[in-house]
Image (cartoon, coloured by chain):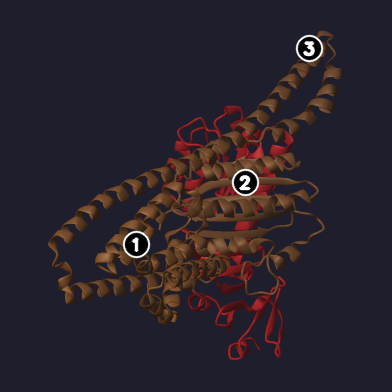
Chain colours: A red, B brown
Amino acid sequence: MLSVYICEDDPQQLAMLTHYVRSYIMIEELDMELAIATRCPHELWTFIEEKKAFHGIFFLDIDLRATIDGIALGTQIRQKDHKCKIVFLTTHGEKMPLTFKYKIEALDYITKDDRVIIRDRVRSALMDTQTFYTTSQSKDTEILPFKVGNQSRFLPIDQIIYLETSAAKHRLNLHHEEGQLEIYGNLTDIEKMSKNFIRVHHAFLVNKKHVISINRTTREVVLTNGHIIFGSVRLLKNLY
Amino acid sequence: MLFHLIIYSHFFFILSSYLMLNTKIKKNKLLLSCIFFLTVLCCFIETHISFIGLFIFMIGLLLSNYFSDSVSTSMILLAKLLVSYYICFFLMKITSPFISFVIISDNNGFSILYLFTGIFLNGFLGYIIRPYLEYTLHKYNFLRKFIYFITCIWFLSNCYQIFMYLYFYPQNFQIQSLFIVLSVFFVFVLIIMILIIYSLESKKKVQQAQQQTQTAYEEIKIYSHALEISYQDLRAFRHDYNNILLSIQEFIDEDNLTGLTNYYHNHLKTTQEQVTTSFTRLDDIQNIGLSEIRSIIMHKLNKAQSLGIAVSLEVHEELLEKAKIDTVQLVRLIGILLDNAIEAAQESNTPSLSVAAFRQEDDVLVIIENTYSTSLSKEYLLKLNNLSTKGPERGIGLQNAAAIVKQENRLFIETRISDEHYTQTITIQQEE
């Protein structure tokens, strides 16, 4: 059973949201319940404080007319549970898409100007949450945790294409399906994290699921993102 | 007299090649007079106690230059001084038979010839070496360490030499009066030297302050320009708003509800989008503490706006009051990434550029997101997107960014490419 949490300071909009959520849970026969719908962020926080994981979706207004705003509340929620879904309700002036997406990793944000849009977005948010929880529970994805600066982050190992040593000390360049980033770590430790990681060179660690072809004479390995890396004579044999 | 000049000749030689190496000195009259004073003093000391004169001369030259020059680093000054010293040293060593011949012959003509050729030769060598010196120092890192090493050796060997000299020839100090005169003179000159150095340093400080006010002025100019633009936007909006109210009143006066409904859906609904996009939240810029960072972001966003790119900025909390990294490098990095973003956004069908900054755990994240041309595929960009210098395919202007990140161990950059957006993230580690 998943929970839906709503925090919105305007009573009319709160009633509207509650109505939409209730009706969609009924219509789509979702395995969800409306846990709390409140106007006060502190009330929401005391309600969820005891829980370890929230298993559900939050609808948060940005301007809550309280000592804490929606973003700060979202940050707190995210710190306790990185899996739950958060959707922000904003007016046009408060819209901060990048902050929502990258700081809170919000599922979506709904601008409060058109009832039809709000209705549709609430529905799709509920559906997305349902599918996320059902699929993520069924399969055990391997996850690589790592540090960037002081932040702890993680990525599913399936999405990682390869890692290479960086020019800076104690750092690696991690290439994944959508780009690349620098992380702290060393290849020897990460190699042990999954059977899919193969060391082809003292400076390269590839995910064997992402290897397209190997040229044995030139010792080049072509990867799914188009990058070509070099293997060493001794270590390249691990890939065959 | 000429005989004395020959004894001091190495001062002139060193000075001539050093002046050639460091051309800036010629413009600074105060420094020139200081050097002249120094030379005279050292000549005097050298007559009585050799080695010490040269020693004081070198150190005085270095100090006075260091305090008067606000641009060069001590390393470059040291290098120039050492090079001129060793040019003179080797030339003297090579021509030592000739020098002894000149001294023994006691011929004024020969002495003058020797002095002038020496000065000319040293100056000429300095002139030749000058263009290569800074370039090689900049290019080869190990040379810099080597310079400090040589300086240490030079200093120690000179100290040793002076010590030995004073230890083995105490008869030089038998004339007490000379020693007293010398020390009084020395103290006197020292005071003057200190005064000159002090004035030179205060001048340097004034220059730096001037530079700072100059940059602050630039920032204010950029900011006021941005304010002006947003004020113009606001005025245009007020004008539109009045017109809209008037036309609505018209409909209400006529009791024409269907007309009003049509008007609302056909005209007003469409302006909503405009209002929200033209009023970008650039006022958020005040939340960034460091003025350098503020001005680079402001500057680039203004540029993007003038190129017709939809711009937005999100900084919802106060951050970057101070950075623990070199802000110049951070400004460069943000500049490079924003330039890349503007360039890419320009070629897209719906050009847009968003910048966000926020705290995450103990780090500050700066995110730059832009749209890119539809003629480029995600796959192609991913292939290009390689920060490492190892691959044959190198990133788009990213090498510079990578070089900065390599230098600053508190910076991390990340690139992410989705079907519509190209996102660059800078992580600034504030605490360790």
> Could you tell which of marks 1 and 3 lies nearer the N-terminus?
1
Q: Which residue is mark 3?
A: B249
x and y, in percent, of residue B69 in the image: 45, 52
**What chain is tagged by disc 1?**
B
Residue type, numbered disc 2: Val
Q: Does residue A26 appear to the left or right of A194 in the view shown?
A: right
Marking on residue B355: 2
Tag nearer the camera, 1 or 3: 1
Q: Quadrant of the N terminus of chain B?
A: bottom left
Q: B378 or B140, which is in the foreground? A: B140
Mark 2 residue element: strand
Q: B146 or B166, which is in the foreground? A: B166
Q: Does residue B161 appear to the left or right of A171 in the view shown?
A: left
x and y, in percent, of residue A135 in the image: 63, 62
Up-down: is A4 above or below B7?
Answer: above
Determine the image quadrant of residue A67: top left
Tag nearer the camera, 2 or 1: 1
Give the residue at x 65% y 50%: B338
> Could you tell which of marks 3 and 2 lies nearer the N-terminus?
3
Give the residue at x 72% y 30%: B275
Residue type, numbered disc 1: Phe
Give the residue at x 47% y 46%: A76
Q: B342 or A25, which is in the foreground? A: B342
Mark 1 residue element: helix
Q: Which residue is mark 1?
A: B57
Residue type, numbered disc 3: Gln
Marks 2 & 1, CB-CB < 8 Å contact: no
